Amino acid sequence: MLVCFRLCSNTPAMKRLTNPAQKTQNSSSARMRGIPSVDELLGRPRLLALAEKAGRRLVIQSARTVLANLRERLKKGAGGDSATDSAQLEMDVVAEVEAQVAPSLVRVINATGVILHTNLGRAPLSAEAAAHISEIATRYSNLEYALETGRRGQRDVHTSRMLAGLAGAEAAIVVNNNAAAVFLVLNTLSKGAETIVSRGELIEIGDGFRIPDIMAESGATVREVGTTNRTRIRDYERAITKGTRLLLRVHPSNFRMTGFTERPLLEELIALGRRSKIPIFEDLGSGCLADLSAHGISEPVVAKSCAAGVSVVSFSGDKLLGGPQAGIIAGKKQIIERIRRNPLFRALRVDKLTIAALELTLRAYLRGALDEIPALRMIRLEAGIIGERARKFIAQLQLSVASDVTFRIAAGFSVIGGGSTPDQQLPTHLISILSPRHSAAELEARLHKPANATPVIARIENKQLILDLRTVSASEESELAAALASALS
């Protein structure tokens, strides 16, 4: 009997009965057969109502996605016993539809202390600029219509005069970003000819975009002079030939080189340009229209370059200027007119919403109302005020979180960001948060998707979650508190 049992246990039939993998496969197959069809799902009352509201095509597409994902999970042996339950699948389809129709671009709270955070949209606009955008976006406007004459006008007129005045230039135009501005200037003034630039200024401006690449695409021939760390005025002088059409100076706004370094004064380069009758183009990058030196920020002011005699400058609109994404080109009227006549100008021009936002931002400069511009208001905010806000914020937050959560306030630094002032910092007070239930990395992740709250972007230092209220408006503090309470739960 013992031998017989052993023989019987090795028969194919017994193997099928005792193989766990086979049982799992049979169970998976059974659940596969239990998956309802798309039509069966769409026949349920809740999904019928959803199809009326969101459109049948979207609901069908979402149902197919949900069912396809379920089949993949079952093939891999995943998915619980309720995976094919029609009620659960119905909820999954509703969630998929909601995910499809929900905006991907959403507002977040920037608690990093990085004022011009490139990943978070750089400079936030003022409430006045946002209101003007809304008015222009939802109505018709005189974008290219001259109300005085009743004829076609130019969209430049809404910003060009103010830009030229604030920059101390004869004329100014706007394109969609500073990379486009650099490209357009080079293409207009130096296509098929040489542009001389210091080797130490051939920088990368972000996301892999490099000055040499932009120059090459513009049609200009790059003539490098000097060395990485030292370039003198005589290097430019020796490089000038009959084919030279432009002398380029690039402000290293996103890095600093220290030590054994040298480059010509701007005045020296301008004097050389005048002697050689060659225009000087300065790419200022950050676009500082107001002198911020009193607040610890040392950046070249656009008007000083124009007053010194630079032929043409370019800079960003959404950095230290504090406006929308844009590239501003300002300088001598004759040169600006040449650039404007370039056919590529139309391809790179900005739309009415950018013009609306830029116009309201510039008007704040004209009135001297710098605190109306959020980026400048944050830069000018004193550390003591931030510290007082931090103490009140913690006192209020402690009422809604567990008593074992530790809050501390310590002196620290905010930064400008956005490729500006890389070695300059603003004194601030930082809030550090330590929870016994969640690591700093877990808290940071939970803040990205808090339950029923606005996403929060913070930073981690020394394994602690760090918040800087410099970049959090007073009106956002209650939302920040709600998000933190959810994440710390």
Image (spheres, grey):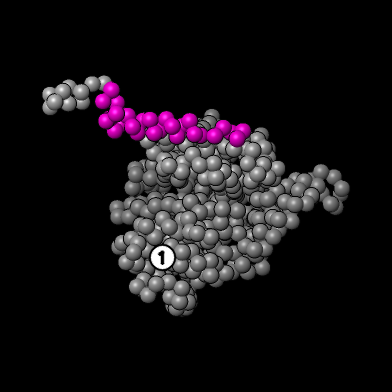
- Residue at point 43% right, 62% down? 487
**On the rendered structure, is 368 left or right of 382?**
right
Q: Is residue 189 visible in the rendered structure shown here?
A: no
Above or below, 173 relative to 14: below
- Look at the image and give the residue range highlighted in magenta: 13-40
**On the rendered structure, is 33 left or right of 158?**
left
- Residue at point 43% right, 57% down? 446
How far across and how far down the image is residue 66, in percent? 52, 38
**On the rendered structure, is 30 left or right of 404?**
right
Above or below, 371 relative to 447: below
How far across and how far down the image is residue 351, in percent? 68, 46
- The amino acid type of the residue labelled 1 equals Leu
State whether the magenta stretch is mostly helix, strand or loop: helix
How far across and how far down the image is residue 223, in percent? 43, 35
Q: Quarter of the image holding residue 96?
A: top right
Query: 306 and 162: which one is in front?
Result: 162
Quadrant in the picture for the C terminus: bottom left
Q: Which residue has dot 1 on it?
A: 488
- Residue at point 61% right, 45% down? 101
- Residue at point 41% right, 55% down? 445
Query: 437 and 333: which one is in front?
Result: 437
Query: 67 and 460: which one is in front?
Result: 67
